[in-house]
Amino acid sequence: MTKINNYHVSATPIERTYLVGIHVRGTDPLLTVDESLQELKMLAQTAGMEVVGSTYQIVQKIESATFIGSGKVQEVIEDVQMLEAQSVIFDEELSPRHQRELEKRFGQDIKVIDRTTLILDIFAQHARTREGSLQVELAQYEYRLPRLTRQWTHLARQAGGGGSRSGNAGVGLRGPGETQLEVDRREIGRKIDKLKEDIERVRQHRERHRQQRIKDRVPVIALVGYTNAGKSTLFRALTGADVYAADQLFATLDPTTRRLELASGRHTVITDTVGFIQKLPTTLILAFRATLEEIAEADAIIHVVDLTHSNYIEQYEAVEDTLAELDVPSIPRILVGNKTDKLDNPAEAEDLISRIQLDENYKGKVTLSAINRQGIEALLEQIEDTLIEMTKRVTLLIPHERGDITSLMHNAGIVQSQSHVEHGVLIDVWVTPEMREKYSQYLHIEQEEPSDVQED
């Protein structure tokens, strides 16, 4: 059973829904109104709904009362009645005032949903870990709190899976003169505070793991991309991990991390992160900040795009915009053009990827088919080259008794050669600036050219 704005939607029969888009003259959105409505249709289908019709309105400015204007609202009401739809989804985030007014106009028999609510619902369906569930529940509560109406009473008992995770089951007794809405608002406020505490503990746990990786100097690579670009399929192709992948929006939500060994023997950690989308709700970005910190703390980013999508350039830009909103620093990046197997002519992949204007953070680009594993070796080589570019080549003389450092160089550095000499192990290796500084006491040669040291 699906929950949208505290309404329960049975899986059978499928809920019939009607989509409404809007374009404000003078604005320049990433997608046209038709393209955005097509994406909204995919979102609705992902949520288990049947889209029976759609329309859009071009306006000079957003109408203060009804969002799209009274005349257009009446037109939509007539279409909804004729098509026997049970809900209307607006392709923008509705303000609390717009939500209340539109609910009044459509009546109690028609549910009014906006894009943000729909995405929150999809995230709630796809969160498979306690961390993901906590983050979605927080986003749901924070979004719904200012939108409570009389028909949404006792929301705190039902939203986000019943409230059991946040430890405050049930609604407290009313005080003198309190309305049920006021009781619900107070209860949701308590739940929000508890969820924030739980998520902060998750953040601290992640931070401890991150600091351990930094201590071990294991490079971290983050996979990012528009939802359904094929990140999880690529993650599985690179690591062999048994992760869920499907041809739908937000098929996976919770981040997955695995070790990846490169051809040189160097070990890295690669993380598959949540897919992005245009108009990603601010509440979700805030709730998932603990998870998305993995991107900001990465040593390199692989940005995956679906070359078969008609708006792949706009999708690339939407992801870059979100990364900027998250204050992700200038981390080296690799662009991956995925799904070449679905192109009529795979040879056109290079032309398609070359149309994307890359900034100086991008160190390379690769086209591949993650599902067929074609081009994976080229990507692994590009990862290796990118990591090498971030490192410095040195020769260290490590005492025999410090085998732990020699082992670390093989795991976290890129070893070119190694030999045993009288006073220790002479190792020619690419290391990060931090590693070079940390083990500078063992520095034997700092070089740009290959060493003459003979390999064992």
Image (tube, rainbow, N blue to C red):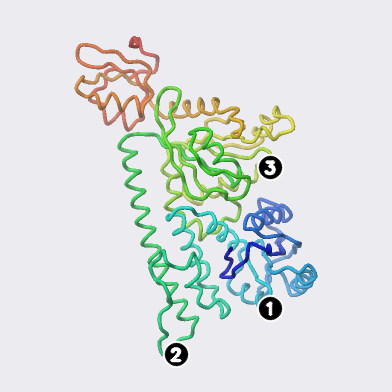
Task: Tell me: 424 left or right of 150.
Answer: left
Q: What is the spatial separation of the Cα atoms under label 2 and label 3, in whole angstroms? A: 56 Å
Q: Which residue is mark 1?
A: 107
Q: Which residue in the protein does label 3 denote?
A: 309
Q: Which residue is mark 2?
A: 177
> Real-space Cα distance between discs 1 and 3?
38 Å
| Residue at the image point whose x is 62% and y is 72% from the top | 99
Up/down of 104 relative to 343, above or below:
below
Circle 1: residue type = Gly
Provide the secondary structure element on which disc 2 rests: loop
Residue 27 in the image: x percent, y percent?
68, 57
* Secondary structure beneath label 1: loop
Binning the other alpha carbons within 10 Å of mark 1 as few (below 14), some (14 to 19) or many (20 upward) gives few
- Closer to the chain start, of discs 1 and 3, is 1
Q: Residue at x 61, y 40 (%)?
A: 305
Q: What is the x, y in percent for residue 332? A: 48, 35
Q: Earlier in the sequence, mark 2 or mark 3?
A: 2
- Which element is circle 3 on? loop
Q: Residue sitting at 57 percent across and 65 percent down?
A: 3
